[in-house]
Image: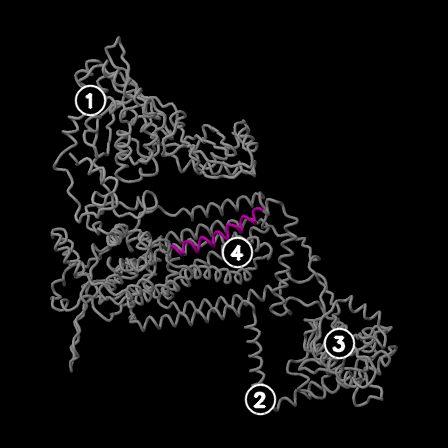
Amino acid sequence: MRAVLKPFVIHAAYSPIETIVFFSIVGTLAYFHVLSAIKHSAFFAPSYPSILRPSHALLRGNEWVSVRDTFWHHAKAKYSPDASILPLELFPVEYSLDSVHRLTETTPDWLTFFANTDLTESVLNFTKEIPTSISGFAYDKACFRPVSSEALELEAPCFTNELVKSRSIHQTLAFTPGVKEDFTVAFDRLIKSSPFHGGVEFEVEAKQAEAIGDMKSSKWVAYAATALVVRFWDLAKKADSLDIVLILAGYVLMHATFLLLFYRSRRLGSNFWLPSAIFTSSVFALLLSLPIAMWFRIPMDPVALTEALPFLVCTVGFDKPLRLARVVFSHPHLQSPVGGSSSNGQLKPAGEIVLESLSSVYTPIFRDYVLEIAVLVIGAYSKVNGLSEVCALAALVLGMDCLLLCTFLSSILCVMIEVRRIQSIRAISKSRVASRVASVATSPTSSPKLREKGSSLPATPGKKQDKPENPVARLKLLLITTFLTLHILNFITPLTPQRHLSLQSINSFRKVDISTPAIQHVLNSLAATEHIEAEVNEGTETNNHGLLVKVNPSIHVRVIPLDSAIHDSASSSSGSGTSRSTSEIVENFMSSWSRLVGDPVLSKWIVMVLAVSISLNGYLLKGIAAGLGGKGSVAKLGGVRFGGDATAEPSSSYAHSEPVVVQQPVSPIALMPPPIIAPAPAPRRPATFTLDEVDRRLQARRLTQSSSSQDASSSSSDNEENDVIVRSLEECIEIFEKGPRPVSVALSLLNDEEVILLAQNGKVAAYALEKVLGNTEYERAVRIRRALISRASSTQTLEHSDVPMRHYDYSRVMGACCENVVGFIPLPLGIAGPLKIDGHLFPIPMATAEGTLVASTSRGCKALNAGGGVTTVLTQDAMTRGPAIDFPSIVQAAKCRAWIDSEEGYSIVKEAFESTSRFAKLRSLKCAMAGRTLFVRFATATGDAMGMNMISKGTEKALEVMQQHFPDMITLALSGNYCTDKKPAAINWIEGRGKSVVAEAVIPGKVVKSVLKTTVEALCNLNTKKNLIGSAMAGSIGGFNAHAANILTAIFLATGQDPAQNVESSNCMTLMEPTNNGEDLLMTVSMPSIEVGTVGGGTVLAPQQAILEMLGFKGAHPTHPGQNAQALARLIAAAVMAGELSLMSALAAGHLVRAHLVHNRSQLNTPAASTPVTPGGPLGTETGGVLGIKARELEKP
């Protein structure tokens, strides 16, 4: 199969325009064939003749207005000679050379009334004799006689109107009301009694119902759409509910397929042209498959095809063209030259890129096509009515889609490659900086593939990505097989054609069209007679009459000329055959062309093709004008990348070096512009460089600058900054607004100082630097923001301060941990312990700037380990959130509280709450009222996450459900401080929040003496007087401890917890008592509200994740959700016990001050005054602030 398709693929790749035009023409011809088949299909043929009803019109002023039937009957009933409205009946008669029956032999096309005057006179003579020839019909009394200005006193003749056309003569007779016999019957009797007159035979024919093939374009399209909708409605009324659901689901999936096509195309860098090309290719596949299906005599029911349309779309799909497009747009030579210096910067031809891409994905794509077609062929031979036809058509469409993928779509991809190259060239020409722009143009990073648009392209084109094969093709094949199996087993039947269709619902009653030329000619003549009558009656007392006409259906009379008349006409026309044939050929061609472009679909197709052709040709011409070579070479711009020094360097120094492609420059390189040389009489040709050679020079210069920047002092770095050339604001704005898209590519053409200039002038927001610079330039965004904030401050020190910035993964920070990032603050990290907790040894990580804290905690760990370690128990795990809800009255608030406390209300709230997350489990609800305000405290288990976001989402959902039961309730705030979060509160101390942990340990008395340098009795007495009585005297809430917040906050910072939550997490009660007859020390620590997690928040940062991984608590527990966070809470409680024990021992022994003087008062680390000195504010000592007054009072002797 590869050998069969290869010639077509090669021709399409190297002749894309011809291929596109060829398939456009073939698709148009296929459209005509399908259109003809539809128009002459028996499906749209009416089952019985349609009834043509008369039309009614009223002359109002100079315009005829259509009126209802009732208006005519009312005027006819009140008719009298003096009536203001005169009703008339019009009977049109059409004498035509053509028969209304298609199978009847007609007269030659060259015989017309204009060419044969004898024939015309014979027919006109017969029309004049009709009034006197009709027997049994009072024509003279019934005909309408208009008033004539020439014969006012004489009786006016009966009104008749004749209109002669090439193949027909139209006569219209007018009658006043009161005719006893029907004119149609009398006229038919006249023709049958004397059919021959003047060498012409007349025959009255009953006109058939207008078939869809005889209708005009707009009329048949409307009729076909109406018939299809009506038949679909009949099927829907008779179909099962399951069938309707399946059809609706199919249409939903079809539209989802279209949306997915545009979404994936956008990710490939194309918003419109790529999805349009793929969609057009699929439409052409369907159009070309339908004539082949007709040739194979595959029966096709329009209703079944309409039902099968989603099946066809989902079967064909767009994954294979998108797979090919992805490989094409990620080709390594899409924007970069092929070889080294010998290539002269030539780009690989677009045809070769498409051929190479198609070769790389040909096997999986063709395999999927073969498997899907094989399954459909099995369905085609299933002999299931309806299914076999659809499967056969789907197999043909898939085969044609495979051919168009290799030819038509490949040609369009070739054109898109050229257009993208032209866009790059035009973007380069607009940047006005040859060195910076040319490097971007030849670098693969210049292709649009950042953020949403083009985000699915690889970061490095040409680099193979080890990704698993897309399972969409396998899933689609499985769905097709399942669908066919279910249909064969008769589980579903939407594709079965319905034989009993009701056509009676289509309204077959139509009215006479009064807008035809023949009827309009009659109405204009009547209007003219009405004006004459009005002028005649101006001086009389006669009332003016308004005309109301009833236009009856036309009587069709076929004119059959005798052989002699035809022979005479033929002989007379033979002499002027040349002139007639030429004029008729032109006339026939123009008529055919008019009908062609009048088609509702083809006319829009022609306009669209012309518009695309003009736009594409204009764009290609602009690209050629911009300097794009015919063989894909990159244009030589107005300048070179190096100025004067570039020519001085010998080009041979880099002649043998390999080409180097730099993905990201180490620092912005701003080169001096080439010097302006005065014009000379005979200017010499400037030296030229290949793009690869220039790139090598840029790379060498970057490496030189990088090494010098690392070894140089601050003065040398300042000199480098002074060498940066900053373009004007207007140039920067032009590059920013008109440069290549997305914006990140345009900003990559600017150095840092130019981006800072844009930000200072409001073109780029400082807070959005990461967004506009791209997701690979986070560090550059931080660097630029530091400069902006520093230069806007009074001290201007931040830009070059000691706040670290480099070598940090900011991608974890953005959108999760911090905004307006200017760096990071490193904290010293110490490890205390290890400490045995529940039988296992754990290191205690502590990030702190307080001396002696880690050492003191380590001493406590040593003492606790000597007694066998710490035992912990978890008494509760429930994060809380307490919204505030207002009610119109306290009665309503009390009802809601009672409903929440009831079993029914609790179950409803619990179900709504837990529907938001699989980890959120509601534990309890606690209510409190304050007037008309109800506070509800949700207590929830949140797995391994700290859980504030999880519980907030669940609370919001529960409040929505409560609103349904209590419509008058108003949610004041999702958090009503009844939680309570980051504030000291008795409810957290009493009820608990987060993890409630109690730890216990026994320290032998000898260890208390040897390690802690104190006694059991002294420790117990100090703990009672300090931690219990002292805290009670201070009115403390949860502060019955020595320094639990010290250890807890240090561990919080080391493990990525929220430091602000140390307020309630530090609630702790330390108890000590003698045991074993007073020999040993029994110590317990109770912490009811430790709020920690190992998922989300600061735990996503790499250093904090490393600490959690060291502890074995990283991420979520694989089998028992919440166990990692609970283990971290146990570790914190045990570490707090170690810190409490050591500090209390130091206080009891009097060692605290001495230890701090040794470990926390180093003179070497005392910071010097800030330079420049920070200006003193209103609190300074020089301005007389409050602190200044206190300081001066202390300085007095």
**What residue type is disc 1 on?**
Ala
Residue 742 seen in the current view = yes
Q: Alpha-carbon neighbours of circle 3 within 10 Å: few (<14), some, or many (≥20)? A: many
Residue identified by numbered label 3:
92
Front position in the image: 674 or 730: 730
Specify the label residue 1146 is tagged with.
1
* Numbered disc in front, either 3 or 2: 3
**What residue type is disc 3 on?**
Pro
Magenta segment, which residues? Answer: 245-267
Coloring scheme used: one colour
Residue identified by numbered label 2:
579
Q: Position of residue 784 (x, y in %)?
A: 26, 53
Q: CA distance from mark 1 to mark 3?
A: 123 Å
Between discs 3 and 2, the one toward the N terminus: 3
Between discs 4 and 3, the one toward the N terminus: 3
Q: CA distance from mark 4 to mark 2?
A: 50 Å
Q: Alpha-carbon neighbours of circle 4 within 10 Å: few (<14), some, or many (≥20)? A: many
Residue identified by numbered label 4:
393
Is residue 257 part of the magenta span, yes or no? yes
* Numbered disc in front, either 1 or 3: 1
* Numbered disc in front, either 4 or 3: 3
